[in-house]
Image (spheres, helix red, strand yellow):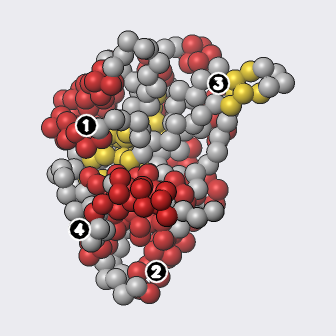
Amino acid sequence: MADLKTTYLGFTLANPFIPAASPLSADAAGVKKLEDAGAPAVVMHSLFEEQIVQDAVALRRNLEAGTESFAEALTYFPQMDEYCLGPEEYLENLRKAKAAVRIPVIASLNGTTAGGWTDYAKKMQDAGADAIECNVYYIPTDARETSADVEQRYLDICEAVKGAVKVPVAMKLSTFFSALPAFTHALARAGADGLVLFNRFYQPDIDVEKREVEPHLVLSTSDEIRIPMRWIAMLYGKEEIGLCANRGIHTGEDALKLLMAGADALQVCSVLLKNGPGHLKALTAELNALMDKLELDSVNQIKGSLSQEKCPDPTAFERANYMKILLGYKA
C-alpha cells in the first residue's frame, strides 16, 4: 500500500484529500463526520464579508437577489434562517468543531475588500482555527479598475490577514489573472503560505419566460482538473508556497494527475455533495489502488514529477502543445 502522506500549510496530512468549504462543514457534527470518513483536515464553511459588515436584513436581500456573489452555491444551502449564522455564531461553531476533532480545522473568510472584516481572522485564530483560507470572490465590473488594481486588492487582503494572525494563510484564487506566475510571486512576498487553485465562479442563468436572472448551479466534472493541473505544473518549484488543487477532483486518477503536476493537497467538494462524506474513503482507496498498480511508493515520490520543470517535454504546458493539437486535428 502506498504512503499517501503529504504536507500542506506546514501540516503533515495522512492523505491529500481535504474537504473544501461547503455546507458539509457548516458545524461541528459535519466536521466530525468528515474526520470519521478519513479527512486529514477540513475547511469550514465560509464566513462572508457581508455577514460581518451588514445587518441580517440587508444580507438576506443581497443573497436572495441572485447576484451569485459567493463561492458556495445557493442551491446547496439550507434555508437562510437555518444556515446564515452571524459572525459570533460562526466563531462558536468553529470552537466546537475544533474541540470535536483532532485534525487541522481551516477557517474560511470570503470577501472582496481590505477592511475591518479581516479582523475576524484573529478571532478565528483565537477560536481555534489552525489556518485561515481567504476566498477573495471578486468580479471586477468597473471599467476604470485595472488588472493591477484587482491584484492589489488581493495583496491588501493577504497582508491584512497575515498581519492579524500567526497561523498559516492560504489565498483562494480565480483563474482570471493575466500573469499568474508574477502574481503568485507577489502573493508569496506578501506572506501567503498557500494557494488554492482555483475558485469556481458560479455563473447566473436567464429565465427567458420570467425575464429574470437566476442562480444556476452546475457541479464540477473531472474535465475541470485541467485548468488547475496546468497552472500547478507551471508554478511548481517556483515559490516556497503550498499548492492546493481545487476543481473537478472526482476520482483517484484525477488526484494522481494533480499530484504528479505538483499539488501538495487536493480540495474536494462536488464529489462529496453528490455522494456524501463517506466517499472520502472511496477516493483514498482509488488513489491507493492506482498507485499500487503503477508501483508508486508514495505521494512524495510522485509530487511534481510531471511539472513543467521536470516534464520531458515542458512545452506541453505552453503554446507549442496548443499548436500541435489544432494543426493535428482531423475531422
The mark lying in front, picked from 3 and 1, is 1
Q: What element carries label 3?
A: loop
Residue 66's label in the rendered image is 3
**Quick one: quadrant of the N terminus?**
bottom left
Give residue 299's position: percent from left, percent from top. Answer: 31, 72
Q: Earlier in the sequence, mark 2 or mark 4?
A: 2
The mark nearer the N terminus, 3 or 1, is 3
Residue at 47 percent of width and 18 percent of height: 141
Mark 3 in CB contact with mark 1 (< 8 angstroms): no
Give the answer, above or below, for where 281 lies relative to 190.
Answer: below
Q: Is residue 209 visible?
A: yes
Q: Out of 256 and 328, give the one closest to the viewer.
A: 328
Cβ atoms under marks 2 and 3 closer than 8 Å? no
Tell me how far mark 2 sits from mark 3, CA to CA: 42 Å
Label 3 to label 1, Cα distance in Å? 31 Å
Write down the residue under mark 1.
183
92 relative position to 155: left or right = right
The amino acid beneath tag 4 is Lys
Q: Which of marks 2 and 1 is in front?
A: 1
Q: Residue 290, labelled with which disc?
A: 2
Assign a secondary structure to mark 2.
helix
Asked whether the viewer can see residue 36, the reply is no
Residues at marks 2 and 4, CA–CA distance in whole angstroms: 22 Å
Read off the residue under disc 4: 310
